[in-house]
Amino acid sequence: MERTVAVLCDTQIEQLVDIKPFEKAIKRDGTISYGVSSYGYDVRVGTVFKIFTPTPKTGGIAVVDPKKFTDELMVTVDTAEQGTDHVIIPPNSFALCETVEWFDIPRDILVLCVGKSTYARCGLIVNVTPLEPEWRGKVTLEISNTTPLPAKVYANEGVAQFVFLKGDQVCAQSYADKAGKYQDQGGLTLPRVD
């Protein structure tokens, strides 16, 4: 039996996926676009960033270990508190941040993330693992500055596009069924191994 996977269009995304706040696709002059698009949803980056710094606050040589990741390797910047509309990511570094939007993914949908071309053309790469069926929360994004220069990222503007894939069958085990460690995250969450 042939299986198919459909990509959701704008009207299906609005009907089938719980996104809060949900934004329509409209032209916003001077702003990196966000909201629903023909076959995806452009998410906004929030105001809180954790920027990687190669020198831990405690001094010494640091090793990045996903099983023992420490907040000491990050500097927290809240653009809202600082009264600015952007953050600067140092050369060859990265920042963790959160989406403005909160998602509740249906059991028969998988979400893939791709960075917006506006940032990609500047050497900034956005990454997140797929949002699995029945995952809920704000999404933690990673933005890498691959350039040898400092780079700006604008808070409350578009940063990446989510593409929603609908399976022709419901999965046997969802992220909620597995009690995934990042379920219901309310914002920027550092890596952890439970």
Image (tube, grey):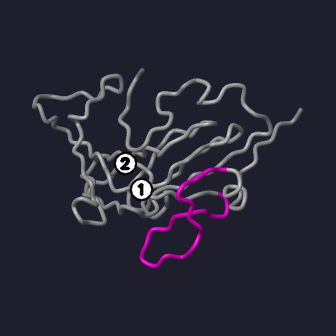
Identify the residue shown where x is 72% and y is 44%: 166
First reached walking from the N terminus: tag 2 or tag 1: 1
Give the answer, above or below, for where 137 lies relative to 68: below
Q: Which mark is residue 97?
A: 2
Is residue 124 rendered to the left or right of residue 88? right
Check disc 2 and report its element: helix, strand or loop: strand
Q: Which residues are magenta?
A: 17-39
Q: Quadrant of the C terminus?
A: top left
The residue furthest left is: 59
Q: Quadrant of the N terminus?
A: top right
Give the answer, above or below, for where 189 lies relative to 121: above
Amino acid identity at mark 1: Val
The residue furthest bottom is: 29
Relative image position of residue 25 (x, y in whole percent): 59, 69
Relative image position of residue 57 (x, y in whole percent): 13, 36
Mark 2 neighbour class, 10 Å CA radius: few under 14, some 14 to 19, many 20 or more: many
Identify the residue shown where x is 43% and y is 46%: 141
Relative image position of residue 106 (x, y in whole percent): 67, 41
Amino acid identity at mark 2: Cys
What is the spatial separation of the Cα atoms under label 2 and label 1, in whole angstroms? Answer: 7 Å
Give the answer, above or below, for where 130 lies relative to 8: above
Residue labelled with disc 1: 45
Q: Are marks 2 and 1 in contact (CB under 8 Å)?
A: yes
Q: Is residue 127 magenta?
A: no
Q: Quadrant of residue 100?
A: bottom left
